[in-house]
Image (cartoon, grey):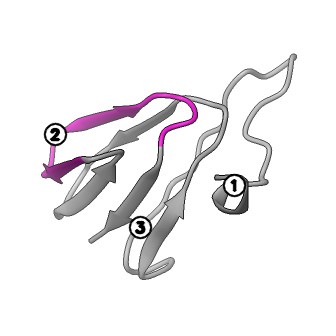
Amino acid sequence: MESIEEKRRHSSILVPYSYYKCIIPDYFLYVPLHWHSEFEINIIISGTGDFKCGTSLIKAKPGDIIIIRPVSYTHLRA
């Protein structure tokens, strides 16, 4: 489990969140299997994607909000 832990720090005591605008596949082709200790909130603006969260597969579409618990395995493909 440790080998797929995402090492990037997404928050601090002063700023307890991070914001990233990500366009898949423009920025990168997919998000590889990973986990981290923060919640992850994904808002789908356009297009579609498949979120693999633990053992669940979520077919995301515009307007969907995907909330992923800390220490959950996650993978995304557009």
In the displayed structure, 69 sits above or below 76; it is above
Assess disc 1: are there few (<14), some (14-19) or many (≥20) residues with their C-alpha within 10 Å of its C-alpha. Answer: some
Assess disc 3: are there few (<14), some (14-19) or many (≥20) residues with their C-alpha within 10 Å of its C-alpha. Answer: some
In the displayed structure, 70 sits above or below 75; it is above
The spot of residue 6 in percent (x, y) is: 69, 54
Q: Quadrant of the C terminus?
A: bottom left
Going by the image, does 46 lie left or right of 72? left
- Secondary structure at badge 1 equals loop
Going by the image, does 12 lie left or right of 31? right
Assess disc 2: are there few (<14), some (14-19) or many (≥20) residues with their C-alpha within 10 Å of its C-alpha. Answer: few
**Residue holding disc 1:** 6
Amino acid residing under circle 1: Glu
Q: Residue at x 26, y 34 (%)?
A: 65
Q: Which mark is residue 23?
A: 3
Q: How far apart are labels 2 and 3 at the CA level? A: 15 Å
- Please check the rendered image and state whether residue 61 is part of the magenta-colored stretch, yes or no: yes
Amino acid residing under circle 3: Ile
Amino acid residing under circle 2: Gly
- Secondary structure at badge 3 equals loop
The spot of residue 27 in percent (x, y) is: 50, 77
Q: Sequence-wise, which precedes: disc 1 or disc 3? A: 1
